[in-house]
Amino acid sequence: MAFWLFKEEPSHFNFTDLERSGEAAWDGVKNALALIHLRAVRPGDRVLLYQTGKEKAVVGEMKATAAKDGVVTVKPVRRLHRSVTLAEIKTQPICQTWELVRNSRLSVMPVPEAIWTWITSTAQTA
């Protein structure tokens, strides 16, 4: 199992939309590197949903249920207890070399396990 982060503008698609629909197809990725990452996602992989725009935060966890030809189907796992903001992420030494911090325009990226653990545990705090 691998860990990923998918970014989306909340006015286009947000975690509430995913909860309502029960699943969604993730496609339309144009950036070459992001598309390489999207094509590497496999069923069973876990995915963090990062909302761009004004929010700039990780808000929920999803699971990939299918993957084919640059389209990944995801279903909701859980809404995070609290969002983990980009500002918080940037303060963490373990995140300094992560693509989210270094290449803010990338819409799909791997999440190193240590960062996944930090984000999901941080999201559980008040």
Image: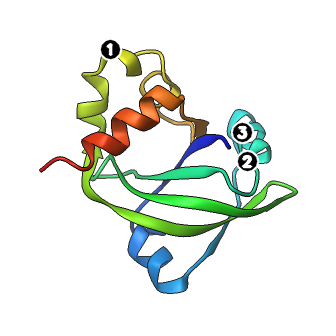
Disc 2 + disc 3, Cβ < 8 Å: yes
**How many numbered discs?**
3
- The quarter holding residue 3 reads top right
In the image, taking residue 24 as reference, residue 118 lies left or right, namely: left
Q: In front: 110, or 116?
A: 116
Q: Nearer the viewer, mark 1 or mark 3?
A: 1
Q: Residues within 10 Å of mark 3 (few under 14, many from 20)?
A: some
Q: What secondary structure is found at the residue carrying circle 2?
A: loop
Note whether 39 is above or below 15 in the view shown: above
Q: Quadrant of the N terminus?
A: top right
Q: Residues within 10 Å of mark 2 (few under 14, many from 20)?
A: many
Residue 117: image location, x then y, percent: 41, 36
How far apart, in angstroms, are the residues tagged by discs 2 and 1?
26 Å
Residue picked out by circle 1: 93
Q: What secondary structure is found at the residue carrying circle 1?
A: helix
How far apart, in angstroms, are the residues tagged by discs 2 and 3?
7 Å
Residue picked out by circle 3: 37
Residue picked out by circle 2: 41
